[in-house]
Image: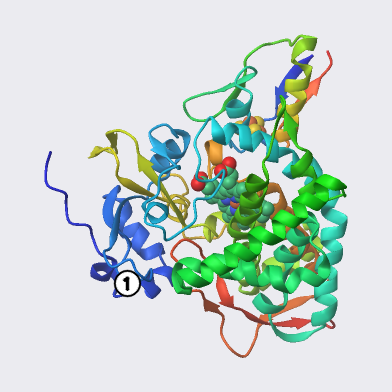
Amino acid sequence: MRLVIDYRKCLKSGQCSYLHAELITADPDGTPRVIAERLGEDLRAAAEDAVDLCPSGAISLTEE
Amino acid sequence: MDAAPTPLSLDQLRGNLAAFVTNPYPIYSELREQSPTFMEFVPAGVVPGLDEPLAAWGFMRHADVYAALRDHETFTSARNPLVEKGFFPQLVLIMDDPPRHTRFRRLVNKAFTLRRVESLEPWIARIANELLDDIGSGETDIVQTYTTPLPVKVITRLLGIPGEDYVTFKRWSDTFISSLISISLEERMQNTMEMVEYFGKMAAARRAQGAEDLITALVEAEIDGESLQDWEILGFCILLLIAGNETTTNLVGNALSILVERPDLWRRMREDRSLVEPVIEETLRYESPVQQLLRMTTREVTVSGITIPANELVAIFFGAANRDPKEFPNPDEFRLDRDLRNPVSFGVGIHYCLGAPLARAEAKITLNAFLDRFPRLEYGAAPGVRQSQSPVVYGFEKLPLRLHTGGR
Ligand code: HEM
Ligand code: SF4
């Protein structure tokens, strides 16, 4: 399971790194970065919430 | 410490507040070079009962605004002298810091996600089209007949307020929004009491039996065993009135006036609806509905070489940041080929607008409905009138348009 950020859509709102600091951090300029390459099942609910809260639909979850 | 500097008064720059409010952009570009600028934030006499002017450090540069919004520890939203002096109610969420803000934001987020808003689009379009059916064609003050009722109808419907209560709700909403400027403290208290009673009853009814509405969602929202109290639900409903209605009214009105002045663009949009989205984003930058909001420094901080002490008011000028030539070349031109990721129209960071997906959906649905119906838009006989009372928002008080259904 992986979180993917589409940087063409991301508006650098800062919401994902604020509410899911365990999954995503932000560069000094506000660009969000996914922390872990792969996520375990225990983080599925948090990852789905991160996908859901992005105001510009820039975050997705892939199963590979 | 040095003696406090004298704040720059707007009179020195522009003659009066109304001139600044109806067109702040020339002043922004004068002040941006020397920003942060210590200036009168609320001139004396504007707020009934506030006899001394309130001064604040005005942030006008994009880089400073962006950095301040991301640093909520240095620039708190939770302290506001207008609230402390009793001129304005302490709002939930938007006037809060973590950890309380975090808990609240998590609980209300679910109701306003992009996905949820997308599922509401069909009935938002129905409301839009009903309003347009009532207007028909010809000349109309679009602020009165369309841009004001649209967001109020959407939010009442979302909250689950019955249609027959719309008029009462609208009055509460108006009283609350204009409260700072023209309404006495007594009237505002009365208004608040009525709302407390109304929403209290509604929340109790939804606790007894749920319905398909936002109040039910708020009553039922739970994270890690935490849920919202009745007063928090009420406070949130009040916040939605203040934060969501006039802002959306102004976005839609500003977009329509920009398009009336660009008939070629209107024709292109009728052929190519992919232009709707960039037009909305550029409108948000070019004529930002929210021009400024307050923060307070929690510690001494240096911004663009100027040292600001702790416990000082900071006015964040979203409108000025969005016209900073360092970030947006030729900022005073309306252009569709900009990088749309950089404007700060909905804020940045922890307080990023909760209603951004909803506001964008209402604007998109509106422009598409107008494009479907009207091959041409024109100004009406009388000119549009910008609101001139509150420097916080930017939009029209009256915007007469002539709507042409037939011909070309
Ligand atoms: C074009 C329309 C709108 C604009 C330009 C706008 C702008 C903003 C801005 C700039 C902020 C950040 C405030 C800050 O940093 O202190 C904000 C916050 C907020 N907005 Fe909006 N807004 C709009 C529409 C809406 C709508 C439709 C709603 C709700 C239905 C809404 C609800 C909120 C809420 C609840 C917050 C506070 C979020 C928080 O503190 O976490 N807004 N808005
Ligand atoms: S929540 Fe979405 S828009 Fe905001 S920073 Fe994260 S990815 Fe970007």
Q: Residue at x 37, y 56 (%)?
A: B85
Residue B52 vertical position relative to residue A22 in the rendered view, above or below: below
Q: Chain of mark 1?
A: B
Rendered location of residue B390, percent (x, y): 45, 67
Q: Which quarter of the figure has residue B373?
A: bottom right
Q: Is residue B381 left or right of residue B140?
A: left
Q: Is residue B200 left or right of residue B313?
A: right
Rendered location of residue B274, percent (x, y): 76, 53
Q: Residue at x 82, y 59 (%)?
A: B124
Local crowd at mark 1 within 10 Å, few (<14), some, or many (≥20)? few
Q: Looking at the image, how many numbered discs can be counted on the residues?
A: 1
Ligand 2 sits in which quadrant?
top right
Residue found at the far left of this picture = B2
Quadrant in the picture for the N terminus of chain B: top left
Q: Nearer the viewer, residue B158 or B371?
A: B158
Q: Which quarter of the figure has residue B359?
A: bottom right
Q: Residue at x 63, y 47 (%)?
A: B231
Rendered location of residue A26, percent (x, y): 54, 24
Name the amino acid, label 1. Answer: Gly
